[in-house]
Amino acid sequence: MTTRTFDLPDLGEGLTEAEVVRWLVAVGDTVTLDQPVVEVETAKSIVEVPSPFAGTVTVLHGREGEVLAVGKPLISVGGAEASPETAAVPVPEAPETASAPADDAGERYREEERAGSGNVLIGYGTPESTGTGRRRRPRQRPSEAARPPAPVASAVSESARPSTPVASVTPIQAAPARRVPLVTSPLVRQLAREAGLRVADVQGSGPGGLITRRDVRSAIEAAGANTAPAPSAPIAVPSQAAPVTAPVPVAPGSVDSRTGLTESRRVPMGTFRRAVAAALSRSRSEIPEATVWVDVDATELVRLRRSDPDGPGLLAYVARFVLAGLRAYPELNGRVDTEREELVQYDGVNLGLAVQTDRGLVAPAVMGAHGLTTTELDAEIRELTRLAREGRATPAQLTGGTFTLNNYGALRVDGSAAIINHPQVAILGLGRIIDRPWVVDGELTVRSVTQLSFAFDHRVCDGGAAAGFMRVVADAMEDPARAIARL
């Protein structure tokens, strides 16, 4: 029985390891091509890894909670078969190639990566250019003489034609037949399926006609199909009741030398938490930040929202006002290039949104937020929040933000001295909106009041610019109709 081992793929985005969150199969289970077999957690998100082989699971290389390095064995499958799409590729000009093993999926998988199909995990993008990068060394393949002849594909069973010579199938090969697509990567087939395309209709540009992700994208554009893939099945994110990282038992009597108290347990930091710790530590150590805050009478904004229950949410309006503030003070939408000692500003805004999930706090971004209407912002914010909580936000969304909006009011708190999301230079926090006594025209009344807190990198501007930005947002929240009319 042939056993094939699938290594943890190159995750891209500079990631070199992943933590096994949950095995979706067990030893002895039968798996099919493209079937998700494991959930892994990187510093970016939780993703499902599909199997490039079909067969019976023989070994799971790694326990749940264990961190595996890229290129290390992930799963072994016995009796591994290639996709039916790659089982036979008629080549009339060279019939002798029919003796090549039709199920060499692993090698074709690597060939596809070399051809530019890119990284092999869901959600990880690849540059369109075929620039330099890490490449796996092909495994040593047996010589042609040592390979057993591959069975010739036929609709007739062997028992029905025991004495039929191989040469007799030549007329069948010469007859018109549907082209069998040469494609091995599960993600290439998934991309085609989600766009409503048949891989058999896609022209491959890789070695031997291999179909790559670039080929599928070109076919989508040529057909005028929707390039946005349909949402796949939600990834199950472990709940707080069943944490991914289990506490490590503490030896009885272990005493902390500093406090003199007995340690009750130790919980290892997972991949995600280690990445968060490193990013926050870097922010605190590199950015000389300052914080300003202001109380805002959001009564009119609340009334505007209630007047149209089906309209944009409060956060979408605030996001719209933030974009107006960044147009007035573009230095807050940039970064500091320490190597060249330059202040960089962006032509456009990728608006990051702090989202609390079961895995921790993430800040995915609405890409190109500056070009969206308030209604479009609302739709994008809702979708992005859903993806983040399901662990399905892409690395581009998780790392591409240029400014962050943090709605900690959703956690029922009033204020926060937030930490800037490095390498960004500012973050705006929105507290809960509650009824408070407020003076209007010399009279005491009850108003809907919230607090804005703003942390900024003092290297890019001084307090005047920070205060000016805050007033743009606060004034718009206090008189939203007038602000929207001017936008």
Image: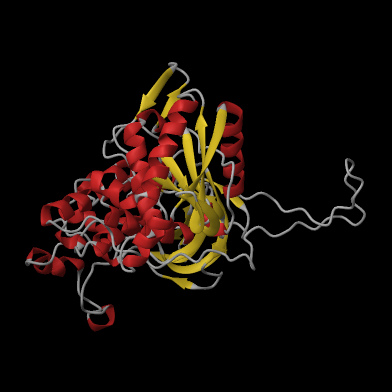
Left or right, 301 with reference to 390: left
Residue situated furthest bottom in the rendering? 160
The quarter holding residue 157 reads bottom left
State the residue in front, 333 or 14: 333
Residue 180 image offset from top left, x and y in percent: 19, 62
Residue at the location (61% across, 35% down)? Answer: 281
- Quadrant location of the C terminus in the rendered image: top left
Residue situated furthest front in the rendering? 442
Residue at the location (83% across, 57% down)? Answer: 264
Residue 128 image offset from top left, x and y in percent: 26, 40
Residue at the location (55% across, 28% down)? Answer: 287
State the residue in front, 248 or 30: 248
Vertical arrangement, residue 304 with respect to residue 221, above or below: below
**Chosen colour scheme:** secondary structure
Residue at the location (64% across, 62% down)? Answer: 243
The quarter holding residue 417 reads top right
Left or right, 52 with reference to 428: left
Q: Is residue 440 visible?
A: yes
Vertical arrangement, residue 147 with respect to residue 119, above or below: below
Left or right, 50 with reference to 87: right
Left or right, 460 with reference to 185: right
Residue 356 image offset from top left, x and y in percent: 53, 56
Vertical arrangement, residue 280 with respect to residue 300, above or below: above
The quarter holding residue 282 reads top right
Tally the marks. Answer: 0
State the residue in front, 54 or 365: 365
